[in-house]
Every structure is written in structure tokens, then in C-alpha cells.
Image (spheres, coloured by chain):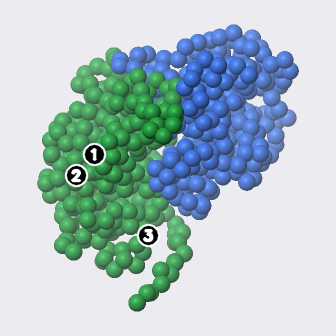
Chain colours: A blue, B green
């Protein structure tokens, strides 16, 4: 097996989750690489949707920003943001939305707004952008983020985007107004997490070389382990070659 | 049609007033830095600045002291990191500069606000914000019941800027404006506004517009001024004309992190030049040439002649 970085493992594991998916809402950075890897491997018919207003993008280079001109040239459709959010997203056409965050809790709720209080934050983060509506309207959400005690927290400082629908639907009447299921998988640099029937995060597999103790030390709550806890399949030669030669040759996101 | 072509200096002098709500729209694409810089040079104060993504243009304008309030949905340097000048005016322990008031939405919320403003409606309904803390942080995001059954959705209020400023590839002298590439929410923001300034790469004859009416984003009917300012969106981009100057965006991080460096940058690149032409001269032909894309022309369509 070839040497690989934790980021390459995270990207390969995230890309594989897209097998069989058709329409995916892409973010910049890690999600963008993961989705473009999936389109070249497990999901050749994947349609890439960017919140900037592009359906069916075929980026010829790694877009630095969410609105890079390369996502327009050669795309199926360039549309207004109204059309993108109203018809494509809220209209129910998005299978998977990718999100990340500064903080996540065991229910998959995400914070991208502030560390500290909203009115006098210690750190002001970017806020929602399209994340709140993606979390609510995409059929399911894949979360990709680095894992540690400061990011996998007991309680969020601010809930920007709601988590697993199952965690709400038992207690909250408003859950019925959410069209999507929320997060179904969380891929980190250490593990793949899924959600059980009650909407709580369960460790599904540890990446090669990661121990249970190591993962426990990288989250604030006591992890729940899948009965059939596995080891994540390491990145294949093909996946590594695509990441290194085509998707992130400069190693901006993967080294 | 009467020509609306004026220099940038006149457009800002006549159409942007202290205390105005100003929207310089364009999602990553076609951001009128030229207009933002002119607003700084003319020393406007107490503006409410609206934009989905404040981007570098509002980091610069807010650092220069033109604004008292910011309406937004994603506050960052796209693909790079933070807008430090704005963060310094929001965060609790931020030293020095005066704090700025914020009013925060999601992207679709901001688009909905312009849409309600443009269509003269009292609110825009959307399914966002369920199980989010955003309505607690911003009480203008409110729940409403559907009049047709038991559905409940959220609503955002109309946004009607005093002035909307958009950059575009081309317009006629009368203000008929055509855009290709990402169109963001410029149409909604323009129709919602009391006054509209269009800044273009190229001034074209009305016949060019009429040869391709599907590409018209904004009609001259709602445009007050047309400013011809090639490269006026730099360091953002104009599809087909020039690429985003990603080096600038990357380097801005260190500049905006340091208030002294930021002041020096504003003095040199905004206050120290008379306008965009001088800014471009300083930037240099080589820097600009490196941003020119290769060619990827669209196919032509035949609208047909019907007599």
C-alpha cells in the first residue's frame, strides 16, 4: 500500500460515499476535491452543482473560490442564485450537499457562525452562506471536516445548520417541515461516522492506523461504536494518482 | 435613448449619499471595486452596506470608515480565509476601531430579500432556518403560516437599496446591460433599488444588445448611470475578459490582518490614485496580461427575422 496523508484518506473516503448519487451540491476545498474524485471513479454520472449558480459544472482546474470562472465554462447551465436556491435546492433536486463546520455535535448540528456568544464573539466565523438551506433541503448531507476536541463538541456555540432529522423528529414538531434527512455521514481525518435510528452519531470505521483511544481523544463526548466497527479501506493507487496529478497537484488541500 | 454615460466620479457624487443603503452586488464575479474605491475617495459616511459576500471590497470600504452597518450572508475571503478588517469590528476583544452593526441572513435569505424588494412584496417565504439559531440572532427572520393548509415557513423582509451598483461585460449608452457567466443576484438587487449604477468593460451600440436580447440582465429603464471602466472589477473577475486575481486575494489576508498595513494599502492604492486608470497603471500591464483567459466563444443562435 502506498503512503498517503490523512487528508488524502479523508477525500478518498468521502468520494466513495457518493457511489450511485446523481446530483451533488459542491463546496470549495476538500468537498470540491472529493466530489471531483467521485466523478472520476464511483459516480461517473454525477452532476456538480455550485451555489454560485451553476448546474452540471465541468471545472478544468481546481476552483480556488466557490465562484471561479472555470465552473461556468463548459457547464450545462449558468443560472441566477434565485433559480439555484429556489428551483434546484428548495425544489428538491439535490441528492447530496457537502458541508463542513468549525463545530459539530453528536446529532450532526453544525456551527459556522461564531465561537463564543453571538453578540460579542471571541471568533467571528463566516456564517451560513448557503449551508443552512443545504442542510434543510438536500436529501442528505455529507459532512467533511477535521476532527478534534474543539470541533467535535458537546454543545455548539451557535447552531447554524440543523443536524440529523431523526434526532429532531421524535421530539420536535418543526422537524416535519424539513424536506431532507440532514447529515447521514461525517468523514474526518480519523474516521467515518454515521447516524443511528435516533439520529445520534456512531463510529462506523476507523482510518488505517487510528486507534479507539486516539479517536476518543479527538471528540468531546463518549463515542458510540458500530457493532461491526471496521477499518476504512485505504486510498487506492488510482485514487491517489487522481488526487495528486489532476485534482490537487500543488497539494493545497491534501498535504 | 439619452446617453447615461458619466465618469465614475460623477456617478458616485450624484447618486451615492451619506446614510444610504448601498448594494455592490456580484457573487465572486463582477464585483465593482472601482465604485467601492471611488466611494472611499469621496469620503461617504454612515452607509449601510449590503452584499451576500462582503468580499474584499467591503473589507476595504469598512476599514476606510464609510459604513455603520453591514447586511450579509457569508463573511469571508472566498477560498482564502477571513476578512480581518470586518472581524476586528465585530469580535468582542477587538481593539481600536469602532464596532459595526450587523444584520445576518443565509444566501437564499439575502436573495429573497432582494426578490421581495424588486417585486414590491411585503416578504419572501422560504424553507430555510428550521432548527437553526439564525432567527434568534436576527428577529427579522420570522415564521409565517401558509394561508393554504398547515404548512409553516420562514419569511424575510424586502430589501430596497437606495443604490445598487453592478459591474457587467457590456451596456449601451442608455444602460441596457448584458452579462454572461455567473449572474448571482444582480438582477434582483438592481430592480429592488431606487437608483442603479452600471459599470462596464465595454460600451456597445444598442444594435449589439438588440441582436441578443436573451443576454440582457438589466434594462436601461432602471439604470441611472453607465460608467465605462475596463478592469473595474479587479481583483475579482469578468468572465471572458479577465480571471480573478487570486494572488491578490491570497495576499490580502496578511494586509487586512494588520491595521497599519491596511491603512498604508488604502493610502497607496485608493486615496493615492485619482481613479481606476491610475490604479491600473500602478498595477502594470504585465500583471493584467497574466489574467487574460484563453478563448471559449459561445455558439451563435438565430433569433429569426419576422416582418
Mark 3 nearby-residue class (10 Å; few <14, some 14–19, many ≥20): few
Counting residues from the start of the chain, the first of labels 1 and 3 encountered is 1
Chain letter behind tag 3: B
Extreme residue toward the bottom, this view: B307
Residue tagged 2: B194
> As drawn, is B40 to the left or to the right of B78?
left
**Inter-mark Cα distance, 3 to 2:** 24 Å
Circles 1 and 2: CB atoms closer than 8 Å: yes
Chain letter behind tag 2: B
Label 3: element kind: helix
Residue tagged 1: B160
For the C terminus of chain B, the image quarter is: bottom left
Label 2: element kind: loop
Residue tagged 3: B214
Is disc 3 on the same chain as disc 1? yes
Residue closest to the eye, A241 or A77:
A77
Amino acid at each position: 500500500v502506498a503512503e498517503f496523508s490523512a487528508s488524502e484518506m479523508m477525500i478518498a473516503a468521502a468520494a466513495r460515499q457518493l457511489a450511485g448519487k446523481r446530483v451533488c451540491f459542491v463546496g470549495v476545498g476538500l468537498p470540491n476535491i472529493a466530489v471531483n474524485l467521485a466523478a472520476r471513479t464511483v459516480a461517473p454520472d454525477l452532476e456538480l452543482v455550485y451555489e454560485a449558480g451553476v448546474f452540471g459544472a465541468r471545472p478544468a482546474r481546481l476552483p480556488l473560490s466557490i465562484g471561479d470562472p472555470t465552473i461556468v465554462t463548459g457547464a450545462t447551465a449558468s443560472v441566477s442564485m434565485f433559480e439555484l436556491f429556489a428551483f434546484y435546492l428548495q425544489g428538491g433536486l439535490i441528492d447530496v450537499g457537502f458541508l463542513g463546520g468549525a463545530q459539530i455535535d453528536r446529532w450532526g448540528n453544525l456551527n459556522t457562525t461564531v465561537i463564543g456568544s453571538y453578540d460579542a464573539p471571541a471568533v467571528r466565523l463566516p456564517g451560513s452562506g448557503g449551508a443552512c438551506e443545504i442542510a434543510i433541503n438536500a436529501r442528505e448531507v455529507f459532512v467533511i471536516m477535521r476532527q478534534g476536541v474543539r470541533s467535535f463538541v458537546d454543545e455548539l456555540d451557535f447552531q447554524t445548520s440543523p443536524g440529523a432529522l431523526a434526532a429532531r423528529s421524535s421530539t420536535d414538531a418543526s422537524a416535519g417541515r424539513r424536506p431532507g434527512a440532514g447529515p447521514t455521514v461525517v468523514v474526518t481525518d480519523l474516521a467515518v461516522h454515521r447516524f443511528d435510528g435516533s439520529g445520534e452519531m456512531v463510529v462506523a470505521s476507523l482510518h488505517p492506523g487510528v486507534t479507539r483511544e486516539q479517536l476518543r481523544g479527538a471528540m468531546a463526548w463518549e463515542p458510540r461504536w458500530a457493532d461491526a466497527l471496521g477499518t476504512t479501506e485505504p486510498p487506492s493507487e488510482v485514487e491517489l494518482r487522481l488526487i495528486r496529478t489532476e485534482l490537487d497537484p500543488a497539494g493545497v488541500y491534501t498535504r | 435613448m439619452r446617453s447615461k454615460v458619466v465618469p465614475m466620479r460623477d456617478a458616485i457624487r450624484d447618486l451615492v449619499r451619506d446614510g444610504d443603503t448601498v448594494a455592490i452586488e456580484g457573487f465572486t464575479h463582477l464585483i465593482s471595486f472601482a465604485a467601492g474605491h471611488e466611494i472611499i475617495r469621496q469620503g461617504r459616511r454612515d452607509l449601510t452596506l449590503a452584499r451576500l459576500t462582503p468580499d474584499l471590497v467591503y473589507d476595504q470600504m469598512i476599514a476606510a470608515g464609510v459604513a455603520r452597518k453591514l447586511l450579509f450572508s457569508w463573511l469571508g475571503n472566498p477560498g482564502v480565509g477571513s476578512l480581518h478588517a470586518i472581524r476586528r469590528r465585530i469580535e468582542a476583544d477587538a481593539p481600536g476601531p469602532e464596532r459595526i452593526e450587523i444584520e445576518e441572513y443565509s444566501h437564499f435569505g439575502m436573495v429573497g430579500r432582494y426578490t421581495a424588494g424588486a417585486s414590491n412584496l411585503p416578504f419572501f417565504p422560504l424553507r430555510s432556518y428550521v432548527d437553526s439559531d439564525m432567527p434568534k440572532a436576527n428577529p427579522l427572520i420570522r415564521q409565517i403560516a401558509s394561508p393554504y393548509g398547515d404548512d409553516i415557513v420562514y419569511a424575510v423582509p424586502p430589501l430596497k437599496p437606495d443604490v445598487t451598483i453592478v459591474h457587467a461585460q457590456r451596456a449601451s449608452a442608455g444602460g441596457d446591460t448584458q452579462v454572461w457567466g455567473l449572474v448571482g443576484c444582480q438582477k434582483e438587487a438592481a430592480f429592488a433599488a431606487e437608483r442603479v449604477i452600471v459599470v462596464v468593460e465595454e460600451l456597445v451600440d444598442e444594435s449589439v444588445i438588440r441582436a441578443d436580447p436573451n443576454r440582457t440582465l438589466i434594462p436601461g429603464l432602471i439604470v441611472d448611470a453607465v460608467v465605462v471602466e475596463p478592469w473595474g472589477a479587479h481583483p475579482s473577475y469578468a468572465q471572458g475578459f479577465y480571471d480573478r486575481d487570486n494572488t491578490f486575494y491570497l495576499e490580502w489576508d496578511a494586509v487586512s490582518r494588520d491595521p497599519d498595513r491596511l491603512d498604508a494599502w488604502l493610502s497607496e492604492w485608493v486615496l493615492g490614485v485619482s481613479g481606476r486608470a491610475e490604479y491600473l497603471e500602478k498595477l502594470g500591464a504585465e500583471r493584467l496580461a497574466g489574467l487574460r483567459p484563453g478563448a471559449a466563444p459561445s455558439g451563435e443562435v438565430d433569433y429569426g427575422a419576422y416582418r
